[in-house]
Amino acid sequence: MRYTVHPSPLGDLLLAGPRPGVLASVTVPGQRGGASVQPDWVRDDAALSEVAEQFDAYFAGDLKEFALTLEPAGTPFRQRVWDALDEIPFGATTTYGALAARLGLPRSAARAVGGAVGANPLTVIRPCHRVLGANGSLTGYAGGLDRKRLLLTHEGVALA
């Protein structure tokens, strides 16, 4: 695995991927369940420079949709949920129940969908921060609710 560390308003992002130009994970400091540098990983800033550039553009307000090659590891169910996250537009939000419905699942599957959203290894890139509780509350962000609030505010979402 190749990795780099890139500064952002969320803290230093750990970006990792199996080969140049391919991203498998993005982790913020202290992220619950986040990746950490392993002994066999190789620091390669150049291999992930396009990822770093897109993060800079996103936080500068110049990019609303990431265009990267992604290879996150996960079960087929998680992959399906993560793909659905990509459909939530910049500046918009949805709920876990609505995301379940979008996937053709009953609202009772909202908890399972929430588990998959919480296991998203590509924070910010796959916009799990755009998923809210049923009553519109900020819930369930592995990077912390302050970061979720920062991302939503950055995207122009009015929070109560």
Image (cartoon, helix red, strand yellow):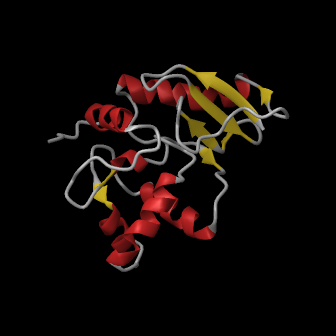
User: Left or right: where does residue 9 sit relative to residue 12?
Assistant: left
User: Is the C terminus in the top left, top right, bottom left or bottom right quadrant?
Assistant: top left
Residue sitting at 30 percent across and 67 percent down?
98
| Residue 69 position in % (x across, y down) | 63, 46
123 is higher (above) or lower (below) than 107: above
Q: Nearer the viewer, residue 46 or 133?
A: 133
Residue sitting at 57 percent across and 63 percent down?
79
Residue farthest left in this picture:
160
Residue farthest right in this picture:
40
The quadrant in which residue 157 appears is: top left
Task: Tell me how many marks there are.
Answer: 0
| Residue 133 position in % (x across, y down) | 28, 56
151 is higher (above) or lower (below) than 127: above
157 is higher (above) or lower (below) than 55: below
116 is higher (above) or lower (below) than 59: below
User: Is the N terminus in the top left, top right, bottom left or bottom right quadrant?
Assistant: top right
Residue sitting at 34 percent across and 62 percent down?
96
Q: Nearer the viewer, residue 141 or 50?
A: 141
| Residue 21 position in % (x across, y down) | 69, 37
Residue sitting at 48 percent across and 41 percent down?
66
| Residue 62 position in % (x across, y down) | 37, 28
